[in-house]
Image (cartoon, rainbow, N blue to C red):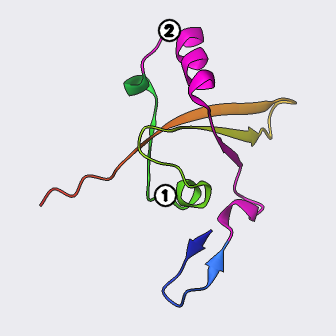
Amino acid sequence: MVTTKKTKKIDVLAHVSVPFHTILTKKETTQLLKDYSIRLVNLPRMFTDDPAALSLGACEGDVLKIIRKSSTTVDTIETYRFCVKRRTDK
């Protein structure tokens, strides 16, 4: 859930345009990295303040699995994101 300024809670994951998100366990993350022969830094990043990450309670270092329905193929598309904190350099 994401809280707006008026303290209204919105479940962004329930919206029809938002694909399914889930946080991988440490074991699943290790297997993913092994299967693709990559490191965490090679995954695309998602900020911890992203509405989907906030709704799931994702923390820095978590890996999220995103499952999208494909409009061009029969199958779904699985993508992964590595959660990082947004830098506040000034």
From this view, report whether residue 73 is shown above or below residue 17: above
Category of crowding for the residue at label 2, using alpha-carbon neighbours closer than 10 angstroms: few (below 14), some (14–19), many (at least 20): few
| Residue at image location 60% in from the left, 15% down from the top | 31
**Quadrant of the rendering where the C terminus is positioned:** bottom left
Query: Within the image, what quadrant is residue 28 found in?
Result: top right
* Secondary structure under the numbered disc 2 in the rendered image: loop
The answer to whether the residue labelled 2 contacts the one labelled 1, judged by CB atoms less than 8 Å apart, is no
Q: Residue furthest left?
A: 90
Q: Which residue is mark 1?
A: 50
Query: Within the image, what quadrant is residue 42 found in?
Result: top left
Amino acid type, callout 2: Ser
The residue closer to the viewer here, 76 or 33, is: 33
Residue 34 part of the magenta-drawn span: yes
Q: Which residue is mark 2?
A: 37
Q: Which residues are magenta?
A: 11-39
| Residue at image location 73% in from the left, 41% down from the top | 68
Q: Residue furthest front?
A: 26
Mark 1 or mark 2, which is nearer the start of the sequence?
2
Amino acid type, callout 1: Asp
The residue closer to the viewer here, 71 or 15, is: 15
| Residue at image location 49% in from the left, 57% down from the top | 50
* Secondary structure under the numbered disc 1 in the rendered image: loop
